[in-house]
Amino acid sequence: MLDQGEINRGASGRNAGSLHFQLEPRMLERGGDPRGLTELIPVNLQAIEDWRRLPGLLRAGLELAMHGGLMVAETPAERDLLVRKWEVETRAGLPVRMLEGAELRRVAAYLAEHVCCASYCPLEGHANPRCVTPAYAAAARAYGAEIRCRSRVRTLERRAAGWRLQIEGKEGAGSAGRAAQSSSFLDAEAVLVAAGAWSREILAPHGVNVPLEPLGLAMNVTERGGPVVRHLVQHVGQRLSVKQVKAGNVLIGGGWPAALSDRLTLGAEPHVRLLERSMIDNAGTAVHVVPALAGLQLIRSWTGIASVSPDHLPVLGAVAALPGVFIAAGESSFTLGPTYARLVSELMCLGYTSLSLHLYRPDRFVPP
Amino acid sequence: MMPTDVCEVAIVGGGPAALAAAIAMSAYGLDICLIDEQPRLGGQIYRQPPVGFRVQSWLAGRVYERGKALLGRAERLTSLHHIAPATVWGLFASEPGLDAAGGHDILYEQDGQLGRVRARHVLLATGCYEMPVPFPGWHLPGVMSAGGIQTLLKSQRVAAGGTIVLAGSHPLLLIAAEQLLQAGVRIAAVVFSQSTRTAARALRAPTAMLGAFGQLVQAGHCLWHLRRAGVPVLFGQVVTEALGSDAIEAVRVGSSDCAGEVREIACDTLGLCFGFLASSELARQAGAQAAWEPGGGWIMAADPFMRSSVHGVSVAGELVGVAGAEAAALSGEIAALGIAVDAGRLEADAALARSATSRRRLARIRRFAALLAAMSSPSPQLLRRLATAEALVCRCEDVTVGAVADALSADGAIASASTVKLLTRVGMGRCQGRMCEVSVRRLIADCRGIALSQVEGYVPRAPVKPISLGALAAAAEMTSR
Amino acid sequence: MGFRVNSGTFRPQPITFSFDGVAITAHPGETLAAALIAADIRGFRRDVRGGLRGPYCNMGTCFECVLEVRSGSSWRTVRGCLTPVAAGLEVRSLRAPTLGRSMT
């Protein structure tokens, strides 16, 4: 495995750590077609199982909390959206129920009065992105995998028996120092491009267009506080995610934008600027939904680069034009990442997958 | 919209650099907003008693006369809009188009409410803080920075304890000791890590020639007073451990070079000073370039008129080199002239001419400040020895030196403070890494065999100080209405 | 222990505030940190391991002196060294983070 920097420094290590098995609000925008939404649920159901098993599989505590997640609504229109979503999910077997009135107050007393209802999935929650990738790395190493950091793949060259990767490495000092550059190459039968927003530039020279747009996002975290929020809280009509981790800090996010200076050439350390407007409005939304947060102090904000596809689904599967090259990148793949990874690995090793990856195929963007 | 002040120049800070700059700028008719975290002007070195107090001998002594005069002149400025106490948490380029006057927005929190100062020119004069040095027990109640004990006495007129030990490597220890002694505190010992010879060199040579390096002259006099009062002043010794359960009860003192016997000195308070680090987080958050200097931390790059690498942002005082109050005032004055030029109030060559004397003086002070820093800084070996495995490196998150060392040895690829932060939680507390960054970087440098200056620190980002979510939410509400 | 230095110092008439339910005398203009130190209280909060912590830098940089003050019907965290005393102010020490230690 080759990473241009240190592992887990991209979106994988910077996201909110939410485990949201309910359909995301933006998926509801894919059109009123319930069948289109229903197709997404099997992967979500699988992800619940995958996360349950993960701490045991990786033999690591991942600060996994599956105490439940709520998607809240305030207006009648928002409520309708939630109900529509709940109908699709329930029919497809996802454990979700609608909470209102006294029951909502009982389950989540910390919610503001103007929250009229919520869809509740008892298995949603969060894990710690700072733990998950390193745990995967340790397990991979135990299986004999070699992980090379500060090794940027410059080119892919087709060879008789597979692919040759040209790698530019940085030895020595941390990135502050004058690191010695080194060039090397590696031969492989198969290549998996899982470079998030950087995947596009790796495949572009081969005429393969992966329409993943880099998107700068921001996250916020508070000081440690006493218990305030037990569940993952999201909002069907606003950008919001709120969760309280074991240490007591409250993480506040939800897809608020940060400014990416150069969208075309990302470079190894792209500059992503925090936006004052995002910080204020994200906090405002959080306090609006959970008033008790007002007494806490925000101590840190950070940015990351996610990548969005035209249909809000990741790109998973074989790259038809480049036999032996596969891709697994895009969209919010912390919750579904372990499942996507397993499916793509099945494809690469067995030639078939236990769940269909048809929706995510790389060539779906090519006009017929 | 949150309360917004628009001005030509915004100054962040209230110490000598900020004061001198404000005075100089006023002479050119510039309209100034000064934002500071303390309620009154003066910064830390001239930290005043609260309004309503009357303190007869506040900063008595010839060495403070110039500073007090500077403070007095600044307080009488009518063109100065003083926003205080206010905590600045971010510096952003003003959104284009919203206001023709814009350059940068300084965002602050005051009384649970957010506020904004929009200015075409910004001067950051945010001072410095004591460099933290981890050793076992340093987190106990009663262990404070020597500067903290000093300002508690100077401004609040409270003695931090009844029996105090002062320890470290900086002459400030002597000044603080003498002030405490006069206030009726028992000084159990003053403990210097450097040998007598090194200390004497620092105290004697430059001052004899210059007579102007006030603090050293002062320190020399203090030493004499302390000795006369029977206070043990130890050289070549170091506090290796603070002992106690709920608070400090004693210190363990041994020789700086490990040889010799160890003894315990009972005390209820310990004051530490091993030098200073520039408080340059805000300047670096704004994107200005800095370089690591052993005697001062992340020091800002600045042109001859103290302009930083970010257009419209100037830096002065300890941010451009830890060199004391007089140097700070001089750099503040020079920065002000630069801003006067940028604001079209003064021609560049006139500014150069007017700043010539100050520049020469500043250069001379800086040379001796460098000497002093070299002679009053703890050696890397000493720091390594003090930072035992059980010492807390991150006080906010209770992470020990040992935990960081374990993380570094578990994965040989880790070479940045940010990665160590993600793995161990160092730097994730309320102080945002101020108290641990230098030590974490030192551990990385030692472990990987690279120079400290080559180890990156935590990424400086807004908020550079914690902000209340309630204040942020209130600002959101205001906009939506 | 900590004490007020009286020689050459005039302070305004004292007021009282409460700390963990106990009445503390202070003078307007003093910071919470100064008043508590003068009252021989130097443990302001508990750390992750349950140990006591108190003021260190006295200038708003170290965040060791964090306390909670009453704000309407709830509480908010403040730095004791930067917060002035006020008559009737309710102040309490910060308890140890209770949700448990994070990884490592």
Image (cartoon, rainbow, N blue to C red):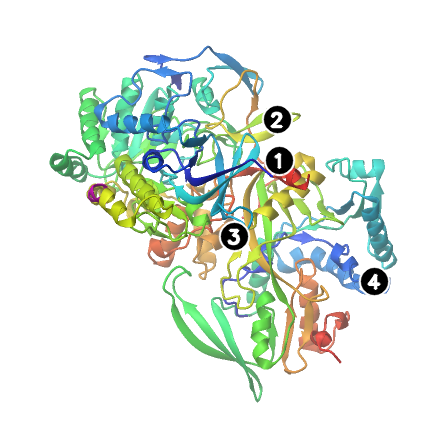
Residue receiving disc 2: C71
Q: Residue A101 placed where, x, y %?
A: 84, 37
**Would you call the spot at circle 1 few (<14 residues within 10 Å), some (14-19), or many (20 or more)?**
many
Residue receiving disc 4: A38
Q: Which residues are magenta?
A: B356-360
Q: Is residue A150 left or right of residue A213?
A: left
Q: Residue A351 placed where, x, y %?
A: 71, 78
**Would you call the spot at circle 3 few (<14 residues within 10 Å), some (14-19), or many (20 or more)?**
some
- Three-letter amino acid code at the position of disc 3: Leu
CA–CA distance in space, label 4 to label 2: 47 Å
Residues indicated by labels 3 and 1 sit on the same polypeptide chain = yes
CA–CA distance in space, label 3 to label 4: 38 Å
User: Which chain does the residue under circle 1 lie in?
Assistant: B
- Three-letter amino acid code at the position of disc 1: Gly
Residue receiving disc 3: B423
C-beta proximity under 8 Å, tags 2 and 1: yes
Q: Check disc 2 and report its element: helix, strand or loop.
A: strand
Residues indicated by labels 2 and 1 sit on the same polypeptide chain = no
User: Which chain does the residue under circle 3 lie in?
Assistant: B
Please tell me which residue lies in front, C71 or B402.
Answer: C71
Seen at 80% across and 61% down, the residue is: A41
User: Which chain does the residue under circle 4 lie in?
Assistant: A
Query: Hey, which quadrant is residue B445 in on the image?
Result: bottom left
**Magenta stretch containing residue B56, yes or no?**
no
